[in-house]
Structures are given as structure tokens and as C-alpha cells.
Image: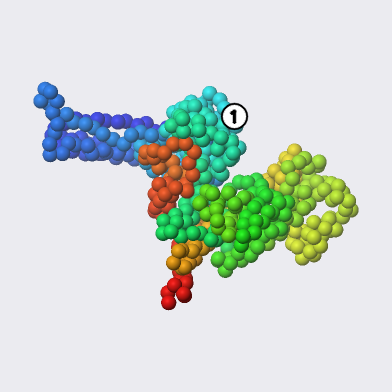
Amino acid sequence: GIPHKSVLMLRVFSEDDSKLDSVITKVDMLLHLIDSAEASMQHFENRPQSSQSKDSSGKSKVRVLGEKEKQVLILGAGKVAGSCAEYLGRSKSTTVAVASMFEDEAMAVAKNASRGKAVTCDLSQPGDKLRHLIEDADVVVSLLPAPLHPMVAQECISLKTDLVTASYESDEMRALCSSSEDAGVSILNEVGLDPGMDHMSAMKIIDNVHERGGEVTSFSSVCGGLPAPEAANNPLLYKFSWSPLGVLRASQNDATYRRDGQVLQVSGTNLLASAEPFYAWKSLNLECLPNRDSLIYGEKYGIQSSNTIFRGTLRYQGFSSLLHVFQNMGILNDKETGATTWHDTLEKLQRDRGFHDLRTFLLSCSDGDKDLATRVNACMLWLGLKIAPVSDPSSMVKSFCDLLEQHLQFEESERDMVLMHHDIKAIFDDGSSENHSCSMQLFGDNTTTAMSKTVGYTAAIGTKLILDGFERKGLLLPTSKDIYTPSLDLLKEEGIIFEEHVHVEQDYDEVV
């Protein structure tokens, strides 16, 4: 387990600076007597300046001040929790408690913080232990699946504890707006990568346009978590840096967006078939899928009149077409497999659709594209899909996720990559127009994935803002300047940098 570390606080009072210095020197010498103790000292310098205040008896009053002890509770110990704990745990005055249903996972995350501790707790439902953990915390960071956030938020509101999440703000969360304001609780949602950094970097540009009297006429924002090009070495050109089930579910969401004044809707069953080439990074051979309902960002960003409002997800070209065939086969359905092996499961799927052999079944699910059907067959062989056992007969998609997770893991020497790009066009009263492009590309390293950095650090920075005294209460998003300005500055310190370029076009008649 994690070794427990003791903490000793000494308060030393003296009007003689030399005596204080002597105490510090002797304590420091003591710490170095036993190397294995791994002891350290934090010294808070709080000596009075040239003048000292006196009480009624004429004696000097010396105030000993230090950083206020704070406690953060991280709920969940998944792929991005480690970087969140590491960032928050840099402060020697902050204890980071990591709660998970699995002790080994909580311990693995907690060790990233200088003052981390692991706690086992059932996080799937309210309970006394969870309530006590929330009550002891100054801020809770929920990295749990989004459906659990409302339960956590209700507990935080009742205990007057602030909350941070990296997930999309759901209707259930929005229903807690009034009660969180009444309780004086800050609930900061959507502070991750997407959502999160996308809001911040986009609103920095949009607010600047609006402050100068401009109007946004086109808005496009895309993001993707991918293997670095040298690690895209499998038939799907993909590896998991976050929840496999989350990736597959996101690939089947309905989508709505506006392009050149026309509203376009894509059903979840056709989303993977709607992928289009994306050229901002020409050497990467990317494609883009529409991401959920883009139109709600018209109001969120104050760009309701924009002719184009589009948000998308980036993948390498070829990913979506392969996954779409698996979807057509029924493999992405959350239903029973009807068998304990994938061989028998595939046979059942093809029989249920009236096919007697796998070849014609694949060709039909590939809409008659022989090359695509051949690629799918090769992918199935690579995954061992025809011979592997089914991991969870109660769920087809979860069993497929387990198989993908086995084969689509990063090797120790491989890097992931995060991409984000905005294209924003604006017009101004003088007839001029501006084309803004804003890009961020980040690679993982040998200690942390890019996905973990961009989600975990962003959530941690949102937490830091609250710990440092952010005053607004109720439901919050990182679309306001008081949140995105300090957040982007702190992300920049971590090497997460957005490169912005502006092309200005003057109206010829106005210039003449």
C-alpha cells in the first residue's frame, strides 16, 4: 500500500532572528540524518517587518501564518485522474484524496500527489462514506461517468462543497442551477479537453471580435485524441487514451450543425458514414465527424447569427468506414451476444439478417464496397474476432470494447496525440473581415499521455481557481473571461499552447 507519512508542524516564537535561524538549521540537519525517511521541510517565513504591533501590555504580537490546509477529493481513478492528482498535489498544503471502488486503482492515482491518499468507496450511489468524503473536502473533482454527476452534485449542494467536472453539462445538472446558487456552491462543468479547452480557446477569439464591434459569420471547431502517426500501426489507425466505451458511444450520437445557412441533421446510425476529409494538418491524413448538437453553441458563444456553426471529432481517414461496417453488422449494439464465442456470435448475427456466409454478410454491411469488406475482414482477423471468447455475453458492445482494448493499447514507447483547431470568420462595420485560425497539437511523453494532460490538467486548473477564491456561485462553464483567461495562462505554463493566426481583408470600396 501507500506508505503513510506523518506531518509535524512546529510554531517557533522568538524576537531574536539568530535564534530562529538556529532552529531552522538544526531541524534541517535532523532531516538529513536518515535518508530512508524521505523527510522534507516547508518553512513559512512570517517574521514581523521593521515594526511590530503591541498588545495592551506592551508585549510584541507575532502572527505566524502559513498556507491554509486544503483538501481535494477526486472521484474516479481512470485514465486522466493521475495528471489531475499530480497537478493539484504539487501544493504542499493540499491533500488529494482519490476515491475509487478499486483500491489498487485509487492507490496508483494517489501516488501522483505529494500528499495523496487512496480511499475505497462505492461511487455508484449515495452513501454515508461518500457523504463523509465530500463533507471533508474543499472541492470535489468528479471524473466519474457523466450519468453519476447529478447524484454527486446533489450531495455537494447539500454539504455546501464546490464541484468540478470535465463532462458535458446535462439537463439533470442544469436543473440544479437554482439550488446550487441558493447553497452558495460553485459547480464548474465542462473543464476538460472537449469540452473545456475548446470553449476557452474559442471564446478568447469570439469575445475579442465582439469587443471590437465585430460579428462572427462562421465558426468551426474540431478536436481529436489519436495515436501519434508512428503509433497508428493497426487496421483501425486508433488506440485508446480514454474510455473505449466512450469512444464507441460518441461514434453513434446524433449530430446537428449549420453550414452556409443550412441546418443539417445526421442520425447516430449514419454518423460514421458522414466523415469528411480534414486538411488543417495536411500530413496527417485526417477525417472529421460531426459532434453532437453544434447549434446550442450559437447561444453559448453568442454567435446565433453565424451562417456556419460546426463542431467535429477528428480521426485518421479509414477509421470511420471500418467502424461503420461493424455498426451495420450489429456489433456496436448494447444487447446480448446470444453466444459465448465471437465465432458463434458472428454466425448468429449473419443468420438473423438472412445471410448464410460471412463473406456476403460483410459485403452487404459494406454497402457493396469490396475493398472496404476486405479491410473489415482483415481487421477482424487482426483482432482475433473469429476465434476469441466473448467477455460479457450480456452486452455485445461491451464485449467488443474489451476486445478492442486488448489490441489497441499504447506500447510503453508509443505516444498519443491531441489535436484541436478552430476556424472563425468575422465581419466589421468598416467592411473588413477577419479569418482566425487557432491550433493546438500536443504529444504525450514517457510519463503522461497528451489526453491525460489536456483533460486532467484542465480539470485541476478549474479546481485551483476555486481553491484560490473564485467567487461566482451556481452552475458555471469556462466560457467567461474570468475563467478562461487564467486557465489558458496556466495551461500555457504546462506546454499546452494555442497558435493563433489572423488574416485581415479590407473592403476595397472602403479603403478607396
In the rendered view, how is the structure colored? Answer: rainbow
Q: Position of residue 439 (x, y in %)?
A: 49, 61
Please say if 442 is above or below 503: above
Give the residue at x 53% y 58%. 420
Outermost residue toward the left in this view: 58
Q: Residue 145 falls in which quadrant of the image?
A: top right
The amino acid pointed to by label 1 is Gln
Residue at the image point whose x is 46% and y is 29% from the top: 183
Answer yes or no: is residue 496 visible: no
x then y, percent, for residue 243: 61, 46
Nearest the viewer among 278 and 118 is 278
Residue drawn at (28%, 35%), measured in percent from left and top? Answer: 66
Q: Which of the 4 quarters of the picture holds residue 149? A: top right
Q: Position of residue 375 (x, y in %)?
A: 74, 62
Q: Is residue 133 above or below residue 147?
A: above
Q: Is residue 186 visible?
A: yes
